[in-house]
Amino acid sequence: MDNTARSERTKAAVIQAALAIIARDGAGRLTLDAIAKESGVSKGGLLHQFPNKRAVLAALLEYQADYYTRFAEAFVEAQGADYAEPALAAQIAVFREVVKGSNSIAFAILAVAAQEPTFMSPVRVRDEETVALILKQARNPARSLSRLFSARGLALSAMLGTCPLGDAEREQMFDYLLDDRNWPADPAAPAPAAKPRRSRRTPS
């Protein structure tokens, strides 16, 4: 096995170990020692790839972002033709999927982001590209953004444990946001009424 393949294998093992620790024990238990033990990677090998916990969380952030990007792409490929605005529908579906994930992972990432605003820069770049695509497909840009950020708000409030809705009610809201029948295309503006023709009087 060459060095590149070995490095990728170690990285994958560390990410899976970190995910397992956070899901099982919570973000507070995520330490380099715990990751080394869980992954079976030596402490030296771990430090070679990830010199500190922040580096591990950065890799987790990239892993999560890649996962949801692939999820959105698969959604568009499988169901995009069913929606007037496929990119928007895919993102609403992504936020629904986010709610099903581990809140502990999000909390661990947000804790770093609160101290280092630039930590989330790669995600922000992806978001800007996604919003640009949504606006390109939008029939009504303001309405499309309202649907997008309503879905994001639902997901964020659920992750933070502040959402007053139950699981079933939240699912109904995602269904409502996703269903194009609730967001019909704006009716075409009526054509301006023709001005009455003025009759010409012939001189007597």
Image (cartoon, rainbow, N blue to C red):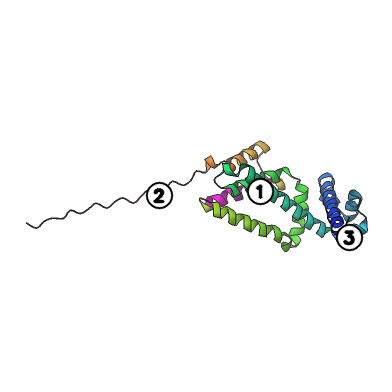
Residue sitting at x 16%, y 55%: 200
Which residue was labeled with disc 1?
Answer: 73
Whether label 3 touches label 2, CB < 8 Å:
no
Q: Which residues are magenta?
A: 142-158
Q: Position of residue 171 (x, y in %)?
A: 64, 39
Most extreme residue toward the front is 1
Which residue was labeled with disc 2?
Answer: 189
- Label 2 Cα crowd, 10 Å radius (few <14 / some 14-19 / many 20+): few
Which residue was labeled with disc 3?
Answer: 47
- Where disc 1 sits, the SS reads helix
Q: Is residue 92 visible?
A: no
Residue sitting at x 33%, y 51%: 192
Q: Locate the C terminus and report the quarter of the image it occupies.
A: bottom left
Residue sitting at x 60%, y 49%: 87
- Label 3 Cα crowd, 10 Å radius (few <14 / some 14-19 / many 20+): some
User: Considering depth in this image, is 115 or 95 the residue closer to the camera?
Assistant: 95
